Structure formats: structure tokens, C-alpha cells
Image (cartoon, rainbow, N blue to C red):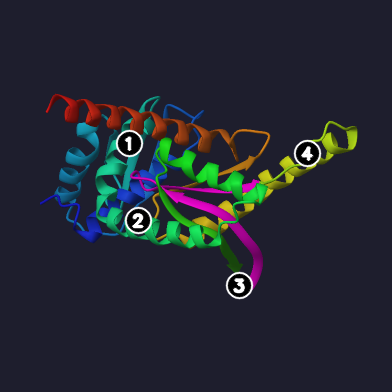
Amino acid sequence: MIDIDDENQRIFVHKICSKILSHPLEQIDAILSIDHDDYYAHYFIDELLQEVFQSEGVKVTQHYNPNSICIDYQMDTLNDTLPICKEWFQPHIEDLKRSDKRTRKEWEKHYEEDHPEYIMKNELIKKTKKIGFNYFIDFEWNTEQDNHHYGSGDLIFGSDYGVYIIIETEWLNKKDSAHARRSRIDARNKVKHQAQIYKQFAEEKFKNKAIKVIGASYTNDSKLRFVDNQDEEIAKMIEKHYRIYYKAQSKHIYLN
């Protein structure tokens, strides 16, 4: 029986979704392989792949190797996988809601309303809810590896799709002098590099929770700058799915 509340099934589906979301977008018409343990009977895996993936147009089949499956990655594979991510991530949503509630209360205590960088961050926190990353998970989080501390990351948000985003921020001097312009360029490059590094830490931190972690940087003189095209495309697709869903929900409420 296919059941999203079965942890083993959910881990299995998340693993496939993660593989799809991590595959470079430009490499279409690719065959991806992913190994799995022999927890499920061969016939049950066929049933799960059929009901969860193939029914949504995502071509995932068993490999000739009984402990491996194949993903036929096409142009629409990523887009078609996001609804699957959303459905199979639902058991984690209550935890995200509790985290969101707790973190927003902590942020209100931490927030300095006269500080320009805090004002910028506060505006960003409001914006993320409008693009599908509506669960505020953390701010000023510790980044550690092998007992070494690498500073504090900035903002982390979650989504209904199991995709988390880390956003590194920087308040820049907007004066119109040659020195200020050079400083802004250096600062933008630095904060984007930080986003790349802290994304890696977040991948480790949330490896048992998130399906995928993406990263971006944000400054007071620019829009979100994603660490790569892959992350940007995933964020755009989530925003598109999110807007379509809530537009449909609003229409349903209006009609009823």
C-alpha cells in the first residue's frame, strides 16, 4: 500500500526527488541512476514508481540491477516533480509551522527597528512568504564542521515543497563615489560567495529534513542573486506553483 506516512516510503520518494532537483537543468535527455537498498520487494517498487512518479509524467523505472532505478530526465521533469515533492513532504509541514511561529517571535525580540540592515532583513522576511518560502526557520544560525565554527549564516526559509533556501544579506553603502561603487561590487561578490559556502553547511544541517537546499544573496541595492542557475530556476518554479495554487484556493473560497 502506498502511504506518505510510511517513513521508509517517504525517504525513498524524497531521495528520488532530491536527485531530480539536483540534476543540472541544461543536461536534458539524460538518464540518471540512483541506488537503493533491498527493503522493498521488486513488485512493490514498481507499484510505488507507477503511482507516485509515472502517473505525474515523471519517467522513473527500475534498472536491470535490482538495487537501482533509472530517471529519464526530460525538459519538464523538474517542473512535474515539484507537485510530488509537495505531496510527500506534507508530514513535515506541522514541524515547519511550529518552527515558523517560534522563529518569528524570536525575530521580533531580536529586531532593531532603527537599524537599516534589520529593516532590510525584515522586508526580505515578508517577501519570501509571497514567493512560496513561507516558513521562517532560522536567523543568525551557527555553521560548524569538524568542531570548527565558521561564523553565522543569515536567513533560512522552508517551503511546502521540501525545498529550503538560505539567504545571505549585506547592507551596502549607496553613496555615488568611485570608492563606494567598488566597495559595493566587492561586497556583492563576497556575500554571494558566503551564500555558496553556507548553502553547503545548510545541506549538511538539514540533510534529514529538506529534499533540497538552495542558496541566494540579497543586498539593499539588488534583488535576490542565486548561487547558480539551478537554484534560481527551482525558486522560480516554486513561486509559479505557489501562486497558481493560492489563486485557485482564493477562487474556491470566493465561489463558496
- Circle nearer the N terminus (2, 1): 1
Q: Are marks 2 and 1 in contact (CB under 8 Å)?
A: no
Q: Which residue is mark 4?
A: 184
Q: Nearer the viewer, mark 3 or mark 4?
A: 4
Residue 102 point in image, percent of width and height: 40, 62
Q: Which residue is mark 1?
A: 81
- Residue 111 has which mark? none
Q: Is residue 148 above or below residue 125?
A: below
Q: Secondary structure at mark 1?
A: helix
| Amino acid at dot 1 | Thr
Q: Is residue 114 above or below residue 82?
A: below
Quick check: 78 above or below 91?
A: above
Between disc 2 and disc 1, the foreground one is: 2
Q: Which residues are magenta?
A: 146-169
State the residue position of label 3.
Answer: 146
Left or right: where does residue 256 sit relative to residue 203?
left
Residue at position x 23%, y 34% in the image:
54
